Amino acid sequence: MENPIDIVITWVDPTDEKWQKDRSNYRNDSNESNGIVRYRDWDLLRYWFRAVEKNAPWVNKIFFVTYGHYPEWLDIDNDKLVIVRHEDFIDSEYLPTFNSNVIEIFFHKIKDLSEHFVYFNDDVFICRPMPPEEFFKNGVPVDSLSWNAVSAKAGCSMIEHIVLNDMELLEKHFDKRAVQKKQLGKLLSLKNGSAALKSFFLLSWKHFTGIENPHVAQPYLKSVLAEVWDKEQDAMLDTASRRFRTKEDYSLWIARYWNLMKDNYVLKSRKDELYYVIGNDNSWLAEQLNAGKRNLICLNDSDDLDDFDKTQKEMKDIFEKLYPERSSFEKTEK
């Protein structure tokens, strides 16, 4: 492969007593989005590794970003695995941190990380074989651009606020109408599906109202994130100072937006991607995965489950049927 492609995945062990103690020292219980569901472990990580090894064997290295812990079954001596602790790339004055935005905006400082990398949350799975060209083509990310509108609904989550913060940064460096003029064909492409219609109706707005955010694996260029830091260091450091997510944060999405504004990407279709909220009955999900209808899926946790243990077993059974064979990232049983 001309340009090696790495994967970055972040993971937290919510049962780690030291992590729990550190978190309790700083925790703000009034902050709902930093609650337990954000850290609840579905015990599906081994299937994540199995899926990557089977469906993306071309991956150069997997950078496993963690507070310092990792599953006991994980073979940390695997040549393709790099354990990265927060202190390895985040300045000590900002640690410990429980803010995913902080962890992510420092990715460009991970030692030996390739220029081309794909970021996975641990709830995002690659569900069928995908060649590297589905993430990078001709050295640039394969991505999509669709306008969106930030909604000020009652009780809105902090995500809307963070997106608006990112839009404010974009306004300082890019002109929406100039972007539209250059990329009109991409914005209104049939590859964007129904999102193209939304973009069409938002064309008349002079300023950025929001950008569609796919909740799946995202390709990044390390140099673009470094460029954001170079242009907006104060904003990045302001976010770094917060140990938990807040409405004032900026996010890693800004690096994606930045790259899109530069028209430095190849347009893709997202029709085979799926954002799925885990429910009490997940038979439809099993059918979709068994039939190979999806390439990438994000499994979103829910506060509304009747029986977490029962649903967790159901999810593990679904993935065990899909990926029953142990990967090289798992220790050999003695």
Image (spheres, helix red, strand yellow):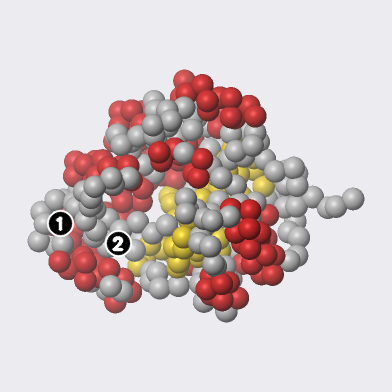
Q: Tell me what residue is drawn at x 47 percent, y 39 percent.
A: 35
Q: Tell me what residue is drawn at x 43 percent, y 51 percent.
A: 220
Please name the residue that numbered disc 2 is placed on. 145
Residue type indicated by callout 2: Leu
Image location (x, y in percent) of residue 27: 46, 27
Mark 2 Cα-neighbour bin, 10 Å: few <14, some 14–19, many ≥20: many
Q: Tell me what residue is drawn at x 59 percent, y 30 percent.
A: 19
**Residue closest to the eye, 125 or 119:** 125
| Label disc, if present, on residue 178 of the rendered structure | 1
Label 1 and label 2: CA atoms lie apart by 14 Å
**Residue closest to the eye, 308 or 167:** 308
Image location (x, y in percent) of residue 117: 50, 52
Image location (x, y in percent) of residue 263: 29, 58
Image location (x, y in percent) of residue 81: 67, 47
* Mark 2 residue element: loop
* Mark 1 residue element: helix
| Label disc, if present, on residue 206 of the rendered structure | none
Q: Is residue 116 visible?
A: no
Locate residue 180: give its quadrant.
bottom left
Residue type indicated by callout 1: Ala
Q: Name, please, the residue furthest toward the right.
A: 334
Mark 1 Cα-neighbour bin, 10 Å: few <14, some 14–19, many ≥20: few
Q: Is residue 111 left or right of residue 204?
A: right
